[in-house]
Image (cartoon, rainbow, N blue to C red):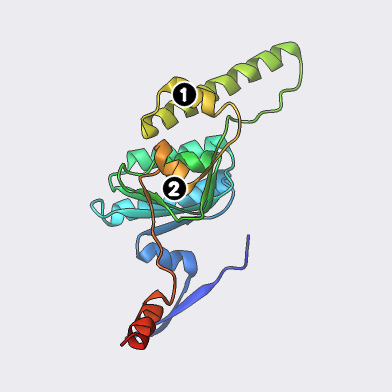
């Protein structure tokens, strides 16, 4: 992981130092910014449970920029998102690939979005199968079962027919923010006004006067 940045705040009792993720948590922001494994998923889940206990009525903001990771870990986060009471606003910045795209889609309907240049990717679970014939058969059944479970979750959150989801996830499917919105993975593409646009407009107004 990258070096942890810290934030220093001035309070009536003096200076207080937070790591950046703890400071974001004060504003009900969770940043999912690494590959998802068992340890990292526990951190994300703990933050969600804390925010629910803190205020079950206020929205949680889940920013996603992740290449994906372990399916079991991702599904643990997914189940927690569905279990807790606060609405979850999901926002993709950068990328939401593999199981991360499912978490992006699993935000509260109407509250899922992405920045204009974000990329979203869906595909079926990967699994190298080795061993004796019986073991290979069991592993293959498990992979097919996981694939079916993921496809049904995608279908539930996108409104697409299961048959279409199965076809679309059979190969890697890369999408722009607009594509993901049209597909139903998100609801909105966040519009960003270029920096300095107001200054340019003001300058043009003065020159034309």
Q: Residues within 10 Å of mark 1 (few under 14, many from 20)?
A: few
Quarter-wise, where is residue 123 in the image?
Answer: top right
Give the number of marks. Answer: 2
- State the quadrant of the C terminus: bottom left
Cα separation, mark 2 vs mark 1, equals: 31 Å
Residue placed under numbered mark 1 in the picture: 164
Q: Nearer the viewer, residue 158 or 116?
A: 116
Relative to 40, 156 lies left or right: left
Q: Residue at x 55, y 35 (%)?
A: 71
Relative to 17, 169 lies left or right: right
Residue placed under numbered mark 2 in the picture: 45
Q: Nearer the viewer, residue 3 or 206?
A: 206
Quarter-wise, where is residue 3 in the image?
Answer: bottom right
Residue 29 on image: x %, y %:
39, 59
- As drawn, the label of residue 94 is none
Residue 105 on image: x %, y %:
41, 41
Residue 162 on image: x %, y %:
43, 22
Q: Residues within 10 Å of mark 2 (few under 14, many from 20)?
A: some
Q: Nearer the viewer, residue 178 or 73?
A: 178
Q: In the rendered image of this protein, does residue 155 appear above or below residue 39?
A: above
Q: Residue at x 70, y 11 (%)?
A: 134
Relative to 122, 84 lies left or right: left
> Which residue reaches farthest right?
131
Disc 2 is placed on an element classified as: helix
Q: Is label 2 or label 1 in front? A: 1
């Amino acid at each position: 992981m990258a070096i942890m940045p810290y934030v220093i705040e001035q309070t009536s009792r003096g200076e207080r130092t937070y790591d950046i993720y703890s400071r974001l948590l004060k504003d009900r922001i969770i940043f999912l910014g690494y590959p998802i494994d068992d340890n990292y998923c526990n951190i994300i889940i703990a933050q969600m449970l804390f925010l629910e206990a803190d205020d079950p009525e206020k929205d949680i903001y889940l920013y996603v920029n992740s290449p994906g990771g372990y399916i079991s870990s991702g599904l643990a986060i997914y189940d927690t998102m569905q279990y807790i009471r606060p609405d979850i606003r999901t926002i993709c910045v950068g990328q939401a690939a593999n199981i991360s795209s499912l978490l992006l889609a699993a935000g509260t309907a109407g509250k899922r979005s992405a920045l204009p240049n974000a990329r979203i990717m869906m595909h079926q679970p990967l699994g190298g199968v080795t061993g004796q014939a019986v073991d290979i058969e069991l592993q293959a059944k498990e992979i097919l079962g996981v694939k079916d479970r993921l496809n049904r979750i995608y279908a539930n959150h996108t409104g697409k027919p299961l048959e279409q989801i199965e076809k679309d996830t059979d190969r890697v499917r890369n999408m722009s923010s607009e594509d993901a919105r049209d597909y139903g993975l998100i609801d909105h593409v966040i519009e960003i006004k270029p920096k300095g646009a107001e200054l340019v407009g003001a300058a043009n107004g003065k020159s034309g006067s």
